[in-house]
Image: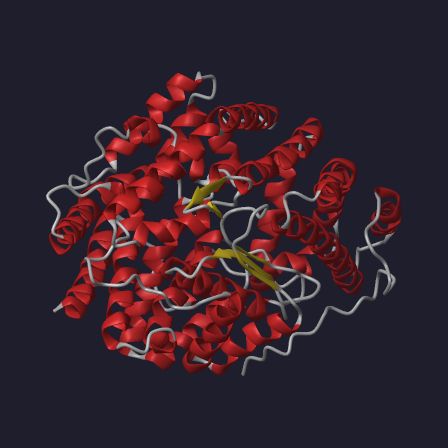
Amino acid sequence: MYSADIKRLSRNFLPQNFTVTDWASLALYFEQLMAINIDSLPELKKWLQDLSELEAVISEDACWRQIRMTCDTENKELEDAYNFFCTDIQPHIQPYADALNKKLLASKALDQLNPDEYFTYLRSIRKSIDLFREENIPLQSEISVLQQQYGQITGDMMIVVNGREYTLQQAAKFLENPDRTIRQQVYEQMQERRLQDKEKLDILFDKLIDLRNREAHNAGFENYRDYRFKELGRFDYTKEDCFRFHEAVKLHVMPLVNNILEQKKIKLGLENLRPWDLDAEPVGTDPLHPFENGKELLEKSVACFNKLNPFFGDCLVRMDQMKHFDLESRKGKSPGGYNCPLPESGAPFIFMNAAGQMSDLTTMVHEGGHAIHSFLSHPLALTGFKEVPMEIAEVASMAMELFSMDEWGVFFKDEQELKRAKIHQLERVITIFPWIAAIDKFQHKIYESPHHTHQERTAIWVQVLQEFTDDIVDYSGLEKYRQNAWQRQLHLYEVPFYYIEYGIAQLGAIGMWMQFRENKKQALDNYCRALSFGGTRTLPELYAAAGIEFNFTSQKIKGLMEFVNAEMEKLEG
């Protein structure tokens, strides 16, 4: 039914050999779109197709500039190319985009468009018109450039272990070492390295908060949080729902986290569990090592996905043929991992920092789930139809983490290692919630009171972090490291307020996994069906298509956490 034989979009409006070089090369096509009559339904549909084609070409060009820069943060030419787009092209596009949006809504044929197909698209268009302010264009350009500085700063963070230099992502493998002294030394080295750039990252965040706050005020909002909620298209929940989520995590998740960590302490035979012990195994138990290098990670991921559904494996193979992977960690590469949709090519790009750890396997299948989403939504008629809410996009990735566990035998031949890997995954499903809640609550507080000092920001963070800190790990003497722990979360710098989606989507993914445990075929069919709608349905409708409920109330969280905990106990039993 679904095929990974993805085809690059055909061009009917732009020349086949057209590439984005400067604003002058693009302006002609925006002018043409402004001049076209769209008062009949055929004219309107043709115009929408032409606009969609232009949007896809521009978006893909911007994506490649960002991909190349994050793959090599030390290359000044790549940085300049990205910044050129942000400062010399994007600012010119925005007024035209607003004018074209208004032209669309003024069309006499607008009411003839199928409301089932166009409702969310037109809702988004209206939202964009409401938010657009000419005076925000230079601010948004400056924000785009500043946001990328986070990756440049953190990409240069290196430490030396046993005479060899490692990125912080690579060095994290030493936190699995059975020698506790080595774990502590590396942990402290990593934290000290982060502290070296604390002031630099604080100043960068100051600039971003100021610009975002001005952007919100220009658009008539009291604060950036309220502006950003509308910009993100959060039509189906409110800030009050987020606050209730924070409280539910404290009530229903923290006790499970405490239990997991208490069992960890017992298993390691420690009187005191310290942060550098969290990834360790008892003496005599080797760390999980699912692959050796990026090539093996990809090969095993393809085999895993093939067993789950051949279409899933075919998607990764197609991306590999197109050279759409950069998997291994190295110096001068931005931290983290992402799946970047490429709307004209169709097949996305996966970027990550693999170092042979269990967490890298999780990242790979997570980003692989996003990639499947890109393949499934690519046939949709308009580029705008493929812009999906993050709360369903992350269900695509997080559900894939859980689905794929059934086929992790390709990574672990030993049954005990396979069981350990599954327990590790389910522990992570639970233990990630407090951090999600802390980061989200921190953002609310920061943007509600944007005019604060570094000391006041630190105090806010420490207070929030303490609310979501377990009762088991001994953090004494590590206060200076914990005070700036928020700086390691790139979302705060690059995609503000995009983080609670992980919590909402994790709940959806657990619901999908419950379904999968009962009827694998039905769950996978629902998964593919929901993702194939792209952004053409509301969030509740997309969740319903997946066979789950858009619900993150306290009672729902309680029930889902109990299910995961019960499944984990079966594995441990």
Taking 446 as reference, is 517 above or below it? below
Name the image quarter holding residue 449: top left
From the viewer's perspective, tell me whether residue 246 is left or right of residue 198: left
Residue 538: image location, x then y, percent? 48, 56
- Give the tally of numbered discs: 0
Which residue is nearer to you in this view: 190 or 78? 190
Res 317 visible: yes
Q: Residue at x 38, y 27 (%)?
A: 445
Q: Quadrant of the C terminus?
A: bottom left
Residue 75, image quadrant = top right
Image side of residue 59 versus residue 320, left or right: right
The quadrant of the image that shows the N terminus is bottom right
124 or 159, nearer to the observer: 159
User: Which residue is rendered at x = 28% and y = 67% of the image?
Assistant: 422
Rendered position, 233 above or below 520: above
Answer with left or right where residue 136 lies relative to residue 89.
left
Residue 241 in sight here: no
Coloration mode: secondary structure
Image x and y of residue 151, in percent: 56, 41
* Lateral position of residue 494 relative to residue 254, left or right: right
Q: Residue 177's spot in the image, x, y percent?
A: 30, 54
- Residue 482 pos. (x, y %): 32, 31
Image quadrant where residue 215 sits: top right
**The furthest residue to the front:** 163
